[in-house]
Image (tube, helix red, strand yellow):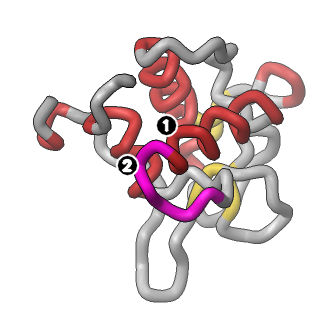
Amino acid sequence: MRLIEADDYPLLRTLEHLCYYGDDSKREAVSGKMPNTLVPGEIFGSGKASGAHGLKKWQAQMVKRGYSLTVDGRYGPATEKAAKNLQRLAGIAQDGKIGPDTFYAAYVLPVQ
């Protein structure tokens, strides 16, 4: 797949802030479980029905790759484990954070 065919990475990327999907309590982290002031339109729903739009797309792409994930837009242990495995296969830092490199790897890395 060409990179142009991948979904755009939806989170804020500026010199001051590089937002990512993760379960940290940092301002740049987006878990899908609560609103984030840096990316207010990214979260849908509220409470247990909340999630992050872009994370839901990434999870759906990972399911296409053969991972067993719930496509709910919420960052939890299964999403973190899938992210770390994909990062290992892509040869990037295995921190479990889904930033641009990990997001695009789900689309462009050959399935093994």
Q: How many labels does the image show?
A: 2
Q: Which of 110 and 33 is in front in this view?
A: 110
Query: Looking at the picture, does residue 108 appear above or below residue 27?
Result: above
Give the x, y percent position of residue 19.
Answer: 56, 64
Crowd band around label 1 with a 10 angstrom C-alpha radius: few (<14), some (14–19), many (20+):
many
Instruction: Determine the residue located farthest toward the front in the rendered image.
Output: 112
Q: Mark 2 points at which residue?
A: 9
Alpha carbon separation for disc pair 1 and 2: 7 Å
- Which span of residues is magenta-colored? 89-94
Query: Looking at the picture, does residue 10 appear above or below residue 24?
Result: above
Crowd band around label 2 with a 10 angstrom C-alpha radius: few (<14), some (14–19), many (20+):
some
Give the x, y percent position of residue 111.
Answer: 35, 24
Give the x, y percent position of residue 82.
Answer: 63, 33
Callout 1: SS: helix
Q: Mark 1 points at which residue?
A: 54
Give the x, y percent position of residue 67.
Answer: 57, 17
Magenta segment's dominant SS is loop
Q: Residue at x 80, y 45 (%)?
A: 34
Asked whether disc 1 touches disc 2, contact meaning CB atoms under 8 Å apart, the reply is yes
Q: Which amino acid does label 2 sit on?
A: Tyr
Query: Looking at the picture, does residue 8 appear above or below residue 51?
Result: below
Q: Does the magenta stretch include residue 21?
A: no
